[in-house]
Image: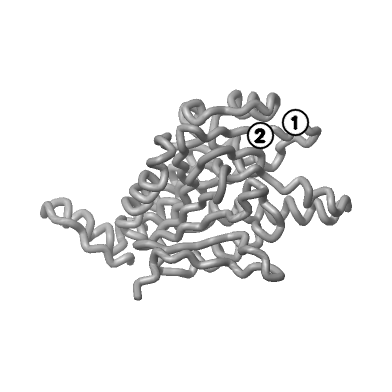
Amino acid sequence: MDTRNAPTKAAPVDGAAPVLLRRDDAGVAWFTLNRPTQRNALSIELMAALQRELDAIAKEAATKVVVIAGAGPAFCAGHDLRELRTDQSRQFYERVFQDCSRLMSTIVALRKPVIARVHGIATAAGCQLVATCDLAVAADTARFATPGVNIGLFCSTPMVALTRAVGRKAAMEMLLTGDLVDAARARELGLVNRVVPEAELDTAVMALARQIAQKSTLTVKIGKEAFYRQAELPLADAYVYASEVMTRNMLARDAEEGIDAFLEKRPPRWEDR
């Protein structure tokens, strides 16, 4: 029996519903945040479940692209504020924000593209998650915000990802006002790549994911790593680094095959080496 499209579940706690669902389809691992009543707020349990899955994904040769989605009416409403009030110690707060920062850093470091499938709201750490993913496709009804300033908690960790995804002026306006930004404006700012009718969201996300999954896995890994590393370097250093990467890439078997296939006007046969 083919189970590629069947959802698999992260282990639930104490018999409760699993906080994270997974299904696999043609090299695409689709993760669904599964706390719909809480608007998929990033509890410690949910962050840990997603962290475990991403750590495992890094070693899975069959998985080429990752999608992160949300169950219910929203993508992700940020951190679980009720959970944050259960323990007011410095150690607890440090744990929550360090866990979140590690999760976001893992997405960036993962040598496989990660796509956010966004509907409803993506606020605070939920907006951070969108900004952190390599690509984002949003429903035309989606809305985004970093509203921490409204409750006396500036979105400092979401700010890290936001300022790397959009311009400084736009990021600062979102951070200082807490206002909701609609999907069209989010696309103008560069927070999301594509905006589609909500009914077409799954189709659009899967089409993009499958398109990328058909590329050379080795080339995509090299490219994603180089993209983020060069962005943090001064211009001259970035070119030195990128030239070294291009040289290494040219020596790979897939580059040889890809160039030959282009010249011979035939589809490439990737070996991922």
Which amino acid, by three-letter code, is at mark 2? Thr
Image quadrant in which the N terminus is located: bottom left
Check the image and name the residue furthest to the right.
89
Q: Residue at x 20, y 54 (%)?
A: 259
Mark 2 lies on residue: 146
Does residue 172 appear to the left or right of 3 in the view shown?
right
Label 2: few (<14), some (14–19) or many (≥20) C-alpha neighbours in 10 Å: many
Q: Nearer the viewer, residue 166 or 29?
A: 29
Q: Residue at x 71, y 37 (%)?
A: 155
Q: Nearer the viewer, residue 150 or 243?
A: 150
Between the C-alphas of marks 1 and 2, the distance is 8 Å
Does residue 36 appear to the left or right of 139 in the view shown?
right
Image quadrant in which the C terminus is located: bottom left
Q: Residue at x 36, y 61 (%)?
A: 218
Could you tell me which secondary element the residue under label 1 belongs to?
helix
Q: Nearer the viewer, residue 18 or 150?
A: 18
Does residue 223 appear to the left or right of 174 in the view shown?
left
Which amino acid, by three-letter code, is at mark 1? Val
Quarter of the view holding residue 168: top right
| Residues at discs 1 and 2 in contact (Cβ within 8 Å) | yes
Label 1: few (<14), some (14–19) or many (≥20) C-alpha neighbours in 10 Å: some
Q: Position of residue 242 (x, y in %)?
A: 42, 47
Q: Residue at x 35, y 72 (%)?
A: 2
Mark 1 lies on residue: 149
Q: Position of residue 107 (x, y in %)?
A: 55, 54
Q: Position of residue 98 (x, y in %)?
A: 72, 54
Q: Position of residue 88 (x, y in %)?
A: 88, 50
Quarter of the view holding residue 63: bottom left
Residue 163 is labelled as: none
Instruction: Please say which color scheme the image uses.
Output: one colour
